Image (cartoon, rainbow, N blue to C red):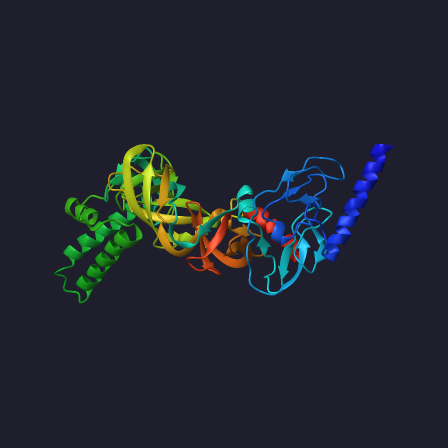
Amino acid sequence: MRRALWVLLALGAGFAGGYLAREGALPAWLHRHGPEQAAKGYHCPMHPQVRSDRPGNCPICGMKLVPDEPPIEAPKQSGKILYYRDPADPAYRSDRPGFNPETGNELEPVYEEAPPGLVMAAPEKLNLLGVAVAEAGPRTLGEPLRVTGRVAVDERRIVRVETRLEGWIEEVRADFVGRQVRRGETLATVYSPELAASQKEFLLARRAQRDLAGAAAPGAADAAGEMLRAARIRLERHFGLRPAFIEQIERTGEPLRAAPVEAPADGFVLERKAFAGQMVRPGMELFTLADLDRVWVLASIPEADLGAIRTGSRAVITASFAPRLRRAAAVAHVQPRADAESRTLDVRLELDNQDGVLRPDLYVDVEFPRARRVRVAVPEEALVDRGDEQIVYVETARGSFAPRRVVAGERGGGWVEILEGLKAGERVASSGVFLLDSESRMRSGAR
């Protein structure tokens, strides 16, 4: 009974203390926590509204009063103060500074000129939350871009060897894929009855020219000469015999049994379709040759890195199968269409291969150097990408951060380039940014 009476008396004293505080007559040992007493004092941990300037016990619950924490300087901001509110209970407002009697939290000012989404907190609290600040400024960005490339034959150095004859292959000399051949080398020989007949016509025309050279009949010698020229043109242009073979026919007076199929250029045999005894017709492809003294490297560039790669971009080619290989190359062509599944775009690099180290379909490493100095850069953690906009939190005063829309550029080495919206020397939040962003969106009413 006595204990219940004591509790009622203590409650009455608390309510009386609140009334006296409103009237300005609160005793020194029990008062509300105003700005002038915030620097030093004691309070009840269960009833924050009970405060005293000396040690003692709480008159409500009897608990020992505990000392206040050292005062924390709140961040200052210019502008007219509209009202004060409890940061933990925004519905509680007051027209003067103080504390919320329900929660014991110190009220924070709300300014008329406060930018939307402004976040303010004591610097010590921000440190506990892991919020750090970095200065925006010039930075060298761009780590090398490394991708895998595939060696390919230069399509402009591919030669397809066809025949102009109808007949049968007698001999195949370039008899395996990969063989290296030289210009003018015989790849195969073809027997053609039509070519044999044309050679005989040529020999007959030549004999007729000699016999009619001194003929008395007018025009006979000229007619014989015209027949010889027509037979020669037929052998050269229709059947593709070189002048050296025609001279041989003239010198020996005997037709060639089989016409040679010669290599039109130096290269390697990439494909062979000629076999002994095979029947061939005009236009039939017999061999595919390729010159590998200069090759292509085809590399797929990820969509996110396309901004740094263009025609003329320099690169360095290395390969695991040739540890000493380090060859310079340049982007000669960028394909107009990307791969829809891999979200990559193929580029073509050209480089010399006189030593023949690079062979078609081998894989190599392609490195594009991208380092360059930018005007303004911030840590990547400082950038908040909301999808439709990119935000950084700029420190307007100590402990105050305001969101600002920016336009981001290239990234590299943990930094991101800021193209618009930020100047060198401004300070931005570089860690704990998502905590600031959540608080900012809540205060501005954003979802």
Q: Quadrant of residue 95?
A: bottom right
Residue drawn 41% across the image and 52% down it? 308
> To which quarter of the image does residue 360 belong?
top left
Outermost residue, right side: 1
In this view, the residue in front, 233 or 208, is: 233
Q: Is residue 344 at all visible to an observer of this figure? A: no
Give the percent coordinates (x, y) of residue 278.
38, 36
Work out which quarter of the rendered image holds the N terminus and state it. top right
Q: Residue furthest left?
A: 214
Relative to the observer, which residue lies in front, 138 or 277? Answer: 138
The residue lying at 31 percent from left, 53 percent from top is 238
Label tally? 0
Closer to the camera, 236 or 17?
Answer: 17
Judged left or right of residue 254, residue 407 is right
Estimate the x, y position of residue 379 in percent, counting from the top left.
46, 48
Q: Which of 400 and 278 is in front in this view?
A: 400
Percent from the top left, x then y, of residue 358? 31, 38
Residue located 32% across and 35% down the image: 178
Can you see residue 195?
yes
Q: Which residue is drawn at 59% across and 57% down?
A: 118
- Percent position of residue 404, x then y: 54, 58
206 relative position to 306: left or right: left
